[in-house]
Image: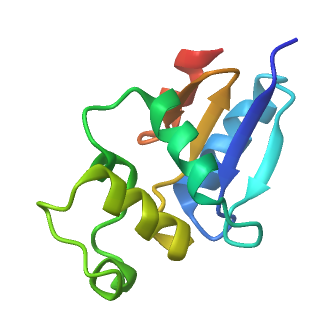
Amino acid sequence: MPNRTLFHNPRCSKSRQALALLQKNGVDVEVVEYLKTPLNFDEISALYKALDIENAHKMIRPKETEFTLAKLEKSSNDNDVLKAIAEYPKLLERPILLVEDKAVIGRPPEDILTLL
């Protein structure tokens, strides 16, 4: 059985919906509350690679106050964005399901089903 990890924020409705969807489908998943257990730069970089998205901006929440605190701009490079997520975990978009070496952002939550 593949390793499955859900990067989850229980205060987020989309994240709760994704977890409920996994449970409804009988999917065993390790839940990581990334605000309680922040990811380090290397883990975030690996997650970015697994997402296979065009740029790191796709994995952040630009409307969070931390976006300004991190001094990020729309033109910030991927490395700066990943460093900012490591420093300000609240910037990480959620939920994210990681299965082995592939990941998907659950926006909408049903997108997580593409990895099952």
Name the quarter where the N terminus is drawn.
Answer: top right
Residue at 84% x, 23% y: name it: 26
Q: Is residue 111 above or below residue 43?
A: above
Residue 76 placement: quadrant = bottom left
Nearer the observer, 115 or 74 = 74
Viewer-nearest residue: 98 or 55: 55
**Above or below 80: residue 72:** below
Left or right position of 4 against 86? right
The residue positioned 56% from the left and 38% from the top of the image is: 46
Q: Position of residue 4 (x, y in %)?
A: 76, 29
**Residue 61 in the figure: left or right of residue 114:** left
Q: Left or right: where does residue 29 sit relative to residue 80?
A: right
- Residue 18 x, y percent position in the rendering: 62, 42
Quarter of the rendering occupied by the C terminus: top right
Q: Residue at x 64, y 32 (%)?
A: 98
Taking the image as shown, residue 64 lies to the left or right of residue 111, namely left
Q: Residue at x 52, y 75 (%)?
A: 87
Count of numbered tags: 0
On the image, the x and y values in percent for residue 29 come to: 82, 34
Please determine whether, in this image, residue 63 is positioned above or below residue 74.
Answer: below
Where residue 17 appears, x then y in whole percent?
61, 47
